Amino acid sequence: MKWTDYGKKIIERKANFIVASNIIELFLTLENIEKKEVFFKWDLIKSDRDDNKFVDCAIAGNVDFIVSNDRHFSILKKTTFPLINVITINEFINILKNEQ
């Protein structure tokens, strides 16, 4: 499943197909969003393998951190390679507040 299809599926839970399609289309046109292809699957999260798509994307995108309150991501704090920082939503909000 492509990330756009997965994203649409998630957005449809809160909205509908048309709204989800429009949001994905918007994401693909924004200058501050870059689409990355994932060429390697790291399989770092064993307890919920479905979460690995986010980790793989984060690695491919060379992100600073993943924002999640999902407990399955806590295993990444013990992983030294590849290094992926995970912060909570509250930590992310504090970062945003401090940058203003």
Image (cartoon, rainbow, N blue to C red):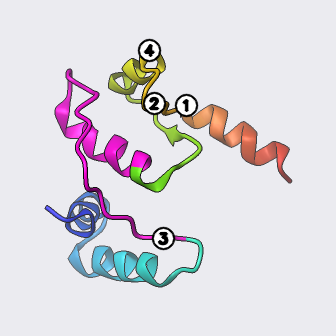
Q: Residue drawn 24% across and 72% down?
A: 16
Q: For mark 3, does the 10 Å Cα neighbourhood hold few (<14), some (14 to 19), or many (20 or more) residues?
A: few
Element under label 3?
A: loop
* Cα–Cα span, label 3 and label 4: 28 Å
User: Residue 46's mark?
Assistant: none
Considering only order in the chain, which callout, 2 or 1, is on the residue closer to the N terminus? 2
* Cα–Cα span, label 2 and label 4: 16 Å
* Cα–Cα span, label 3 and label 1: 23 Å
Q: Are marks 4 and 1 in contact (CB under 8 Å)?
A: no
Instruction: Please give the range of residues in magenta.
Output: 33-59
Q: Are marks 1 and 2 in contact (CB under 8 Å)?
A: yes
- Which residue carries the number 3 mark? 34
Element under label 1?
A: loop
> In this rendering, is residue 21 above or below 8?
below
Q: Residue drawn 25% across and 55% down?
A: 39
Q: Residue drawn 64% across and 40% down?
A: 92
- Which residue carries the number 4 mark? 78
Considering only order in the chain, which callout, 1 or 3, is on the residue closer to the N terminus? 3
Q: Residue drawn 20% across and 23% down?
A: 46
- Which residue carries the number 2 mark? 69
Report the mark closest to the observer, 2 or 4.
4
Report the mark closest to the observer, 4 or 1.
4
Position of residue 27 measured from the top left corner of the image (x, y, whole percent): 44, 75
Considering only order in the chain, which callout, 1 or 4, is on the residue closer to the N terminus? 4
Report the mark closest to the observer, 3 or 2.
3
- The amino acid type, in three-letter code, at marker 4 is Lys
Judge from the rendering whether residue 42 lies leftward or rightward of residue 86; answer left or right: left
